Image (cartoon, rainbow, N blue to C red):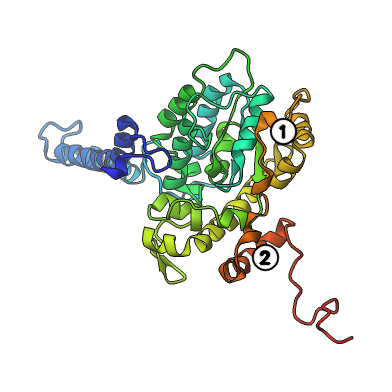
Amino acid sequence: MKEDRFQSTGRRKPRAAAAEAAAAPYQALLWRGAGMLVPLALAALYWVWPNDLIPDQSPMGRVDDIAVAFLGACVAARAATFRPRGASFGARRSETPAGSRAEGVRQLERLATRLAAHGSPVIVYNAAHSGSRLLTRLLTELGVFMGANLSDSEDSEDMAELVEHIVLEHAPDYTGLFAEGDPALDQLAMAAVTEHLAGRPQQARWGWKHCETGHALPVIARLFPTAQTIHLIRDGRDVAFSPFVAPKHPYWRKIYFGVAELRSWRGFAMTQRAYRKHGPLFNATRWVNSVTLGRAHGLMLGERYHEVRYEDLVADPKGAAERIAAFLGLPPPELSTEALHVDTGRVGKWRTLPEAKTAEVLALLTPTLATFGYVEPPLAAGDPSDPAEPH
């Protein structure tokens, strides 16, 4: 079935992880049911059993029965609120007692300790079709091992599956994961990193590029608490007119809109037909969502976050490489545009399109383009600096 495969790679999901995640809610119900019924049944049996510790005919004959019934009720009440570790994806922070360490946080810390043996990764993310293959090649030239299994876009297929699971099951609100954990996460994370690092040269710095990692960064940053992240940003006008996948699957709806349950947007259905007709509009909102989340999540990492503009990378690859090397603490590289296969013709390609085709898309993009410095902020009505207003 299609749901048995990852959307980002098309590869089959691990059976054990999928089965464990699916079985977790039923295991929780089983444990709760047993914990509630067994002590109550034993207490009831004690009430009718003829050989009590204190005979019923004695003055204190019912004390032991009452005590057993009370203890049975207490155990059953505790069982009603018991959750096995990682049994639920849907809990919220409000269900965790104030001041306690949530199980999900403990799970992430344990997993981070296991992953720490691999060293600190370099994580590259961006809105898809932002020219990140160029950045991957640059990092490879800097000596960073970018993975054993790469797609045609040079995304890590192994880390893509981990990111997809995190986003599909938990984004955009990760409080449930932090509170309750995720029964499938340990297996998926360890397998992804192990397979990604196959063939890594000894002692080599490592990292990965996967466009959608920015959506999962609150979790990824906990799994790799010393990782350095590079957010590649490209002019959204060029991204909007680069074909991508339709948001038919819940995972891609989260990437485009942040909501898996969405059935239509601006009156357009979540179908391939609608995407073929209105693709640039869909891509524009995906770019807005990706760069906004990417910056918000990245800034929480402080000095471990670095932004790179694709246009700067194309215009001055050597200068961009030196800045990236300084950020990563690596020696400055000896690079040439020929070695990196830089294509300057990819910058500003949207300008070749007719205005009738770009007007609606530009209207959607302009506020975010202004935020990221690609256009001047639109003037508010009545702004004294507006030349259309009389002075």
Between 142 and 254, the one nearer to me in the picture: 142
- In the displayed orientation, state which residue is furthest to the right: 391
Front: mark 2 or 1: 1
Residue 377 visible in rendering: yes
Q: Position of residue 294 (x, y in %)?
A: 62, 48
The residues tagged by marks 2 and 1 sit, at their Cα atoms, a distance apart of 33 Å
The residue located at (66%, 54%) in the rendering is 235
The residue located at (44%, 51%) in the rendering is 245
In the rendered structure, the answer to whether residue 362 lies left or right of residue 388 reads left
Identify the mark at residue 59; answer none if there is no mark. Answer: none
Task: Report the residue marked by disc 1.
Answer: 337
Above or below residue 67? Residue 330 is above
**Amino acid found under the numbered disc labelled 2:** Pro
Task: Report the residue marked by disc 2.
Answer: 367
Above or below residue 130? Residue 248 is below
Between 345 and 210, the one nearer to me in the picture: 345
Q: Secondary structure at mark 1?
A: helix
Report crowding for label 2: few under 14, some 14 to 19, many 20 or more residues within 10 A (C-alpha): some
